[in-house]
Amino acid sequence: MITFDEQLELFKLIGKDLNNKVTCFAIGGNAMMFYGAKEETKDIDLVFLNKKDLEEVKKVLYNSGFEDKKDLIKIFRHHEVIEKENMPVMMVMKEERIDLFVKGVITFEISDTIDKRVKETHEFDNLIVKVVSPEDIILMKSATERKKDKIDALSLIEKFNINWDIIVEESINQTKLERELFPVFLYDFLTELKEDLKADIPKEVINKVRDIGKAMMIKRLKKGK
């Protein structure tokens, strides 16, 4: 597990050794630590806007003792449709793991709207880390099948006054970007959160997501996709 202080030290190390300015997005448990919603995380998830920046950070990590993790774990819904170029680069050293992504997280894209909602930006020499909003963290976690991601989502719901309209609208936006039918598995995710973990999610929100997902599925079936 990685603590917040350990994460900050790692970011300082990366930023110090980078030759150029590199911007990335903190999106998972590591983002939650910036918000004080989590004390430690199993892995650090960073999204870069281009492959060049990812490779520069990967090189720094190699020089610091990290190695490639070859066996990628199936954690994402609809894992079988993931294109090879969208798979993460997983770097490990002892108990530390860093997952590096380009432009998005498997089936989820860092859109302009997500960038505009960034709540915090931190600079570590040449490494600039943008922390995505709690709403976007929840939405990204809806793309996974891990129980711990549901627990993380519950923690965010309990800590923040979540704007559910943002989550619903971004799920629609992600689908427009020719990604998966996000409202469909967002509905499953929110339903599981409410029924299994007793999360305080308005019933009308879940019903709205269900209706949007159903309409999208019908539309796609009519198009033969």
Image (cartoon, helix red, strand yellow):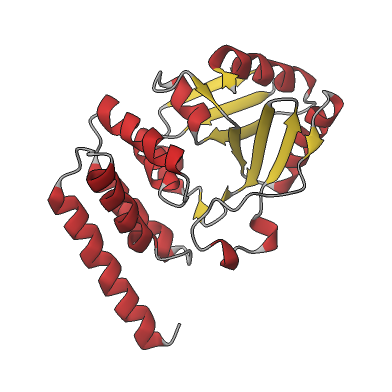
- Counting from the top left corner in percent of width and height, residue 123 is at 59, 19
Name the residue at the right extreme. Answer: 63
What residue do we see at 61% from left, 19% from top? Answer: 7
Q: With 17 as the anchor, is 216 left or right in this view?
A: left
- Front residue of this view, candidates 11 and 89: 89
- Counting from the top left corner in percent of width and height, residue 2 is at 60, 21
Residue 160 visible in the current orientation: no
Locate the C terminus by quadrant. Answer: bottom left
Q: Quadrant of residue 157?
A: top left
- Counting from the top left corner in percent of width and height, residue 101 is at 63, 45
Eyeballing the image, is 179 above or below 195?
below
Eyeballing the image, is 46 above or below 15?
below
Eyeballing the image, is 161 above or below 9?
below
Q: Quadrant of residue 201?
A: top left
What residue do we see at 62% from left, 44% from top? Answer: 49
- Counting from the top left corner in percent of width and height, residue 142 is at 40, 49
Name the residue at the front extreme. Answer: 196
Residue 46 visible in the current orientation: yes
What residue do we see at 55% from left, 35% from top? Answer: 25
Locate the N terminus by quadrant. Answer: top right
Q: With 189 as the anchor, is 41 left or right in this view?
A: right
